[in-house]
Amino acid sequence: MEQAYMEQGTSVDKGENARLSSFVGAIAIADLVKTTLGPKGMDKILQSVSPHNNQGISVTNDGATILRSVQIDNAAAKVLVDIAKVQDDEVGDGTTSVAVLCGELLREAEQLIAQRIHPQTIAQGWRLARAAARKALEDATIDNSNNEEEFRKDLTKIAQTTLSSKLLTHEKSHFASLAVDAVLRLKGSNNLEHIQILKKAGGSLRDSYLEDGFLLDKEIGVGQPHRVENAKILIANTSMDTDKIKIYGSKVKVDSMSKVADIEEAEKTKMRAKCEKIIAHGCNVFINRQLIYNLPESIFAERGIMAIEHADFDGVERLSAVLGGEVASTFDHPELVTLGECEIIEEVMIGEDKVIRFGGCKSGEACTVVLRGASSHVLDESERSLHDALCILTSTVKEPRTICGGGCTETIMAQAVDRAAEETPGKKALAMSAFARALRQLPATVADNGGYDSAELVTQLRAAHASGKKTSGLDMYNGTIGDMKELGVMESFKSKLQVLLSASEAAEMILRVDDIIKCAPRQRDEGMGY
């Protein structure tokens, strides 16, 4: 019927077809990342098929990275990719969990719809289940933010739990301590710009360390001091090459070589004047985002000023933040420019490379994590893993409540939902029971990925919680049920809450779809001349 008034090329999927298409797409995406969940999850190789990208590969088990790289045509699958991205931006961890939970909810919904239960009834039941699960989750939280020593231990445990499912799992205690030290230096500002991650191939992961200060992977100009104490730093984004005539199509005609020399001398005079303006700021270090040519470099060397060129845009912005200076582009009013300050600037060696170290920065929170590793792929995955840990720690500093991991909270929430379902009349109770089953699929998936009998472990876990052991969870290293508090398996409350809310809301949105309308692309006119 719709085809009568729709443009040619527009297609409409209705009713069962639309719902089936949405469910199949979303469940397929959830199954794609399912095997990466948990401390014994597998990795994926992502290979670019674009000839421009040199068919580069990356090896990862980060849910957001995998989903971001997959080209998809299914609308419901794109919803899953979006919630994983939001989880990554909001909290940093739990990207795989959110996609898997959403997929399991839709798998359960498929069976309920086959029993002729209306999608709106299912959505109503899910909302009641979500409220019960959220209350149970909040009741299971632990807050040690008033005790600094205990809170630091909690942060270390959260970092170790996050890293246990990543490439850094074998060195998780080392990297957890690095991440906690870096985040606590921020003193609550939670600006991750102040934590720089510098990757240097060579050595082993164990050789990675936290550098107190800021490292810049650049070189100092020729003939200039390589160590400056009590540095006054002018950070700039200006051209320090010969000024070009920037009028399109303009030409300068001369009738002798002496006039060419006069033009060159005029350019040099102009550059000397610019350098004098820079020196008038009273700085002993000049850092420029753009190139510094030979003439200004030699002028700075004569005056004993350290000059660093081509500090890329990110580097200049971050330097401005940590040194407390402003990025200047013009130099006519020295009194209006704020110089950056630090106690010492020197060259240090990392492996076989020289880098510039800024020590005692004005913004004391600044630090650099130097990552060492066997290859660029290892370093890239290590950076992603460490970034996840840093994000989850900064969000825990903001919202200090923590919970037990290892499937413990999923079981608590499922139990609470089951109890609420028993008290709820009507078909909504069936939807609530389905919600509880979907929650229990998370620990089951973690157990499956470790090669254990998930049915046996999940039933043991349910029995342990029913007998009052509220901190029981999966001990994935021994394939048994263990006390998560004793094993130190802790997670951030904010991360788990975000997983619960995002997954259930996305699943509800996909469930309510009954038509998929694909619009035809706009046709170009033949006579437009494109």
Image (cartoon, rainbow, N blue to C red):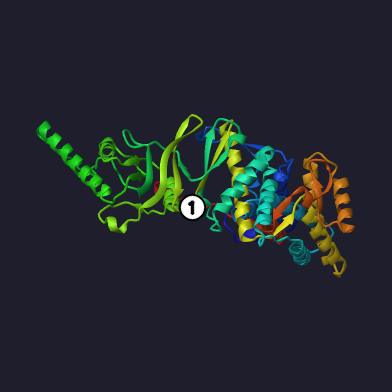
Which residue is rendered at x = 64% and y = 45% of the image? 176
Residue under numbered circle 1: 364
Which residue is rendered at x = 41% and y = 44% of the image? 344
Quarter residue 124 falls in: bottom right
- Looking at the image, residue 94 sits to the left or right of residue 294; the answer is right
Which residue is rendered at x = 54% and y = 32% of the image? 201
| Image coords of residue 74 (percent x, y) | 65, 50
| Image coords of residue 524 (percent x, y) | 47, 50
Residue type at the position of mark 1 = Gly
- How crowded is the residue under tag 1: few (<14 C-alpha within 10 Å), some, or many (20+)? some
Under circle 1, the secondary element is: loop
Quarter residue 138 falls in: bottom right
Residue 247 seen in render: no
Return the residue nearer the eye: 496 or 469: 469
| Image coords of residue 135 (percent x, y) | 76, 66
- Looking at the image, residue 283 sits to the left or right of residue 177; the answer is left
Which residue is rendered at x = 25% and y = 45% of the image? 275
